[in-house]
Image: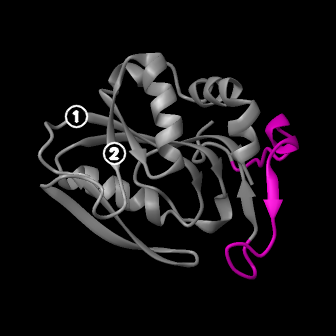
């Protein structure tokens, strides 16, 4: 399901029975959706659901997955293993050997920086992360990939908080919306 094709929220999805909502975390006024219980006991169902929301043929266009720190690493690794595709890591500063490109961006509760190696051959990338909130992290991942001559064909997330972000430059594919 692409966030651009439907504004219908799917808060009745069975995964919501497992996700824990933590009010006022990491600061007052923010509800944090804890997907850890899904990772503990429903990981195969989550990967199946993530793959199921991608349009037919899209994976044929993807050379590798852009894994966004940190829980995006989990999903991208599991999906890449099933598909036999590689991964590009988008990490916090100081975790990748040079040469790297980096970009600082705003979060809903502060700011952060992502880095990626910028000496990789150009590939067609599907970004993978856990939750799309304000869009700062995914937008930064998109911009870093573009600056390294990669073509981003879309972004795959488990949960899209649709009211917190604007339009994204490529399609967003998501299992859950809230």
User: Quarter-wise, where is residue 44 in the image?
Assistant: top right
Question: Residue at left 70%, top 25%?
Answer: 45
Q: Is residue 11 magenta?
A: yes
Q: Is residue 104 magenta?
A: no
Please tell me the numbered disc located at residue 89: 2
Task: Pick the quarter of the image with the C terminus.
Answer: bottom right
Residue of label 1? 123
Question: Residue at left 57%, top 65%?
Answer: 165
User: Quarter-wise, where is residue 125 in the image?
Assistant: top left
Residue range (magenta): 7-30
- Position of 115 with respect to 134 (left or right) is left
Please tell me the numbered disc located at residue 114: none
Q: Secondary structure at mark 2?
A: strand
Question: Residue at left 81%, top 59%?
Answer: 21
Q: Is residue 83 above or below residue 126?
A: above
- Name the front one of labels 1 and 2: 2
Pick the residue in front: 13 or 2. Answer: 13
Task: Pick the quarter of the image with the N terminus.
Answer: top right
Q: Main secondary structure of the magenta part?
A: loop
Pick the residue in front: 173 or 90. Answer: 90
Q: Cα distance, mark 1 to mark 2? A: 13 Å
Q: Is residue 91 above or below residue 25?
A: above
């Amino acid at each position: 399901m692409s966030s651009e094709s439907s504004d219908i929220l799917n808060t009745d999805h069975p995964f919501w029975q497992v996700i824990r909502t933590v009010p006022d975390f990491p600061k007052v006024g923010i509800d944090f959706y804890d997907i850890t219980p899904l990772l503990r006991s429903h990981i195969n169902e989550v990967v199946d659901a993530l793959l199921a929301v991608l349009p037919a043929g899209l994976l044929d266009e993807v050379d590798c997955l852009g894994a966004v720190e940190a829980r995006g690493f989990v999903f991208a690794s599991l999906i890449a293993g099933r598909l036999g595709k590689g991964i590009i890591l988008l990490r916090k500063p100081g975790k990748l050997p040079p040469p790297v490109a980096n970009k600082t961006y705003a979060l809903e509760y502060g700011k952060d920086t992502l880095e990626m190696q910028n000496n990789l051959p150009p590939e067609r990338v599907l970004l993978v992360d856990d939750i799309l909130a304000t869009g700062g992290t995914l937008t930064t991942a998109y911009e870093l990939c573009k600056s390294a001559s990669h073509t981003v064909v879309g972004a795959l997330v488990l949960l899209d908080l649709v009211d917190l972000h604007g339009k994204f430059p490529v399609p967003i594919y998501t299992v859950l919306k809230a």
